[in-house]
Image (tube, rainbow, N blue to C red):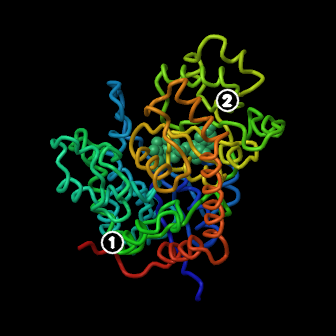
Amino acid sequence: MAPSPPCHVAVAAFPFGTHAAPLLAIVRRLAAASPGTTFSFFNTRQSNNTIFNKDTTTQFPNIKAYDIWDGVPEGHVFTGKPQERIELFVKAAPESLRINIEMAVVETGREVSCLLTDAFFWFGGELAQDMRMASWVQFWTAGPCSLSAHFYTDLIRQRISIAAKGSENEPLSFIPGMSKFLVQDLPEGVLFGNLESVFPNMLHKMGLSLPRAKAVFINSFEELDKTITHDLKSKFNKFLNVGPLNLVSPSLPPTPDESGCLRWLGGQKADASVAYISFGSVMMPPREELEEIATALEGGGVPSIWSLRENARQNLPIGFLEKTRKTGMVVPWAPQTDVLAHRAVGVFVTHCGWNSVLESIVGGVPMICRPFFGDQRLNRRMVQEVLEIGVKVEGGAFTKVGLERCLDLVLCQERGKKMRDKIKSLKEVANEAVGPRGSSTENFKLLLDVVTRPQGVVRLI
Ligand SMILES: O=c1ccn([C@@H]2O[C@H](COP(=O)(O)OP(=O)(O)O[C@H]3O[C@H](CO)[C@@H](O)[C@H](O)[C@H]3O)[C@@H](O)[C@H]2O)c(=O)[nH]1
């Protein structure tokens, strides 16, 4: 193959939840494979500050971070409405991205040939067309089942009447690969909630925009869900599973182990005996549920590491930290991927954010699931009923007794052993996918080609 001509890729990140970090992970990989290409990374200052460190700036001189406006007008008084920051950002994003890309073109002296965006940015196609770029590529940061739900939103709305009694229990069997998923698992905004508000509207427009992108890629591997992958391949120009991203190099540098979780795990004698508990970067369970988790840990004697933000500690029962000092750790942030890969960890109590699910598979650790919002209910269904590598917490919310039973099931019973065997086989498949001839490796080559070998200009039909 002839060497790629020098080109300029504009990357647009969504600065909330765990979206920008996996996008930067893939950009680092693209930048390493194509050192002649310039990658301009547009994101808010706050998000850039958390994901960019010295490692990226020194190792990848061809990646440059740009801080874009967070959309909060001067003097704005927050109403306390959930998602207010997201709505302000989304409203401002099309124009602020355009302005910043124009600035980067002037600064680098290179026209942008490819726009690589978080899939949420439905307007990327128009922007790429107006700026005469050769391609627009979308990155879906969650899993295949939620991507499919957003792609088929219009069909779901046609087929399901939420007014009909019992409709929440209807299976989504009219969507390829989704027969085990139910209407009640759908993310808010597909069928329920205020469908005209900013976020659901954005997701709907995104679902419609996916077939217009030159490629849509996700942090997963094809073998995890062959039917959905096969279907989406037939619907999009290119549908590329390129993960698990934390298994491929260069990935993001590991999270420092500031609280000594790994040292503590090293001191645990029994394999697969520790519960790791975390609910990601956005969600905090209600106070009552935190109390139930704490009492289950206190009474059951299961050793544990609990990643719990500092400001939530006040919701723990009085005396909990002292009573469990010998059997557990409560830390503000854990090196999650390393914790899940540790031999001593036997179960992950999770909200089923996509990155967490994938990291659990990579670690070979079965899950106890307590989904809260968005894609998490679909991910839970996939974990429990499609892949059989986890279980939903009894009753759908944490209670002392329910959690104790689930911990016993996964850590001590035959069913838990079966889950562990299944997830360990999946872990091997994931490793093969990123191996020399694996599906994710081949897909990455295709992605690299679309991103760094521009041809023609975007023309939306
Ligand atoms: O102590 C901790 C806790 C979390 N993590 C990391 O934080 C990330 C959490 O990501 P994820 O599990 O995807 O959860 P959220 O941060 O909640 O992610 C948002 O974005 C995801 C991707 O779109 C969605 O699947 C989720 O529903 C949405 O809440 C993972 O990489 C973890 O390794 C740590 O490193 N240490």
The CA distance from mark 1 to mark 2 is: 44 Å
> Mark 2 CB in 8 Å range of ligand 1?
yes
Cβ atoms at labels 1 and 2 below 8 Å apart: no
Q: For label 2, count other residues whose C-alpha is less than 10 Å away and answer few (under 14), some (14-19) or many (20+).
A: some
Q: Which mark is residue 331?
A: 2
Q: In percent of the image, x 54 and y 22: which residue is there?
A: 292
Q: In percent of the image, x 32 and y 65: which residue is there?
A: 125
Instruction: State which tag comes first along the sequence, 1 or 2.
Output: 1
- Quadrant of the rendered image holding ligand 1: top right
Q: Which mark is residue 58?
A: none
How far across and how far down the image is residue 215, in percent? 41, 70
103 relative to 193, above or below? below
Q: In percent of the image, x 54 and y 25: which residue is there?
A: 401
Q: The C terminus lies in which quarter of the figure?
A: bottom left
Q: Amino acid at mark 2?
A: Val
Between 387 and 102, the residue placed more toward the observer is 387
In the structure shown, which secondary structural element does the residue marked by tag 1 occupy? helix
* Side of 330 relative to 182 (left or right): right
Residue hosting label 1: 235
Q: Quarter-wise, where is residue 231 in the image?
A: bottom left
Q: Quarter-wise, where is residue 35 in the image?
A: bottom right
Between 446 and 456, the residue placed more toward the observer is 446
How far across and how far down the image is residue 243, in percent? 56, 63
In the structure shown, which secondary structural element does the residue marked by tag 2 occupy? strand
434 relative to 82, above or below? below
* Side of 374 relative to 362 (left or right): left
Q: Amino acid at mark 1?
A: Lys
In the picture as drawn, the residue positioned furthest to the front comes out as 414
136 relative to 276, above or below? below
Q: In percent of the image, x 41 and y 74: which residue is there?
A: 238
Between 291 and 28, the residue placed more toward the observer is 291
